Image (cartoon, rainbow, N blue to C red):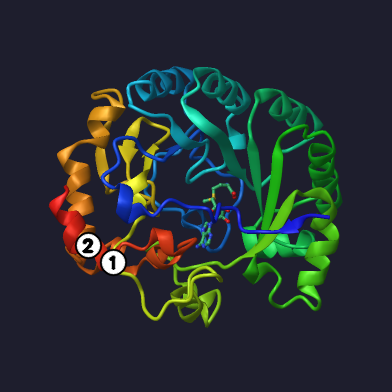
Amino acid sequence: MAEYKQWRNEDRTFLKDVIPLDTPYNLKVEVSSLCNARCVYCAHSKPNHGVYEGNMSLELMDRILSDSKEFPRKYKVMEMFSFGESMCNPNLEQMISMAKEAEVADKINFTTNGLLINKERADKLIASGVDIIRISLQGLDAPAYKKTCGIKVDFDRFVDNLKYLFDNRGNISVRMKIADIAIDDVPDGEKKFNEIFGPIADSIFIEKIIPMYADIDYNTIDGEIYEKAINGRENVKQKEIHTVCNRPFYRFRVAADGKVTAACCDIPNDFYFGNIYEDSLVNIWNSEKRKQLLRMQLEGKRFMHPICKQCTIPNDITTEADILDPWAKELLKKL
Ligand SMILES: C[S@@+](CC[C@H](N)C(=O)[O-])C[C@H]1O[C@@H](n2cnc3c(N)ncnc32)[C@H](O)[C@@H]1O
């Protein structure tokens, strides 16, 4: 039976002690920005989300890997997904194998809605060398999937395919979570979730859906959503929304079209630092444009920015090690 556990490790480095980092801890590679679902809480549910939609090419992946070797260290994790559904890209498994072979990251993972997992794709994933597969669940039956992500799902077959992946996973860690809004109104929802998915995952948990994308009216999804977001992760009780967003200090993203951006909920890529076709990843990581974003955070100006001001991600932290507010002035001197 699966352990009940958040996806992120709780054994985290105190960011205040290590920034500015010479190498990102986390590189997010947007293997695909296409999505086969329209989850009501995600920016993909909006037709005009403003993002380039397409699959990353193998050539771009190759460029990312050769640039990655110029960093002084390996990434702690290379995440083979971002805004879209990576399994929409038929080359996902090949890209994971390329990344594994390049030895640029301690671990390789990706997050998926799992809807495109069938026995053939599961076999390919198992052979790819991926370390962790994280599956985002949206309901406990087909009508719930229709309601939360607007699509028709053969639920029994879906669960069967996930079971096949789990039974044949070898050394891969298969982790699952369900959105809280998908089980809140279901009698014995948590129990049913455990019964269906507990036996076919290494770990499971219930994810709090939080207001993170501009243009989505989260109050229509759940009337208490803003209130719940203030308290972030269960193990970190907070009194107020944090000023400094920690994510751009250790995360970095290459979008499917080669744009290099902050790996956050900035869907239209307004935090655009450069393009991998025009400059190297190391140069872009150390660029003035990225430093400007870090300074904005440390100077407490997040609430003046159109994207950052409504985002509750800065409170979605895993442990106290992610909090930067008390050290903002000191850290500013280091940039
Ligand atoms: C944007 S999706 C992309 C990966 C993949 N398509 C999937 O569904 O897992 C990445 C993750 O963000 C989560 N997510 C998206 N919007 C969210 C929100 N407002 N609050 C909490 N999690 C959210 C999804 O549930 C998913 O686990």
Q: Nearer the viewer, residue 175 or 274?
A: 175
Residue 34 image position (x, y, % from top left) = 52, 40
Q: Amino acid at mark 1?
A: Asp
CA–CA distance in space, label 2 to label 1: 5 Å
Quadrant location, the N terminus: bottom right
Q: With 162 as the anchor, is 269 left or right in this view?
A: left
Residue 171 image position (x, y, % from top left) = 73, 33
Name the residue carrying label 1: 325
Residue 99 image position (x, y, % from top left) = 52, 23
Find numbered disc 2 in the image and state the secondary structure of the residue it sits on: helix
Q: Nearer the viewer, residue 118 or 246?
A: 246
Image mark for residue 328: 2
Q: With 181 as the anchor, is 216 left or right in this view?
A: left
Q: To which quarter of the image does residue 23 belong?
A: top left
What residue lies at 29% left-to-right and 23% top-to-bottom? 277
In the picture shown, does residue 188 fall above or below 168? Answer: below
What residue lies at 81% left-to-right and 32% top-to-bottom? 119
In the picture shown, does residue 262 fall above or below 88? Answer: below
Q: Is there CB contact under 8 Å for labels 2 and 1?
A: yes
- Residue 32 seen from this side: yes
Q: Quadrant of ligand 1?
A: bottom right
In the picture shown, does residue 285 fall above or below 1? Answer: above
What residue lies at 48% left-to-right and 43% top-to-bottom? 82
Q: To which quarter of the image does residue 147 belong?
A: bottom right
Q: Amino acid at mark 2?
A: Ala
What residue lies at 80% left-to-right and 56% top-to-bottom? 197
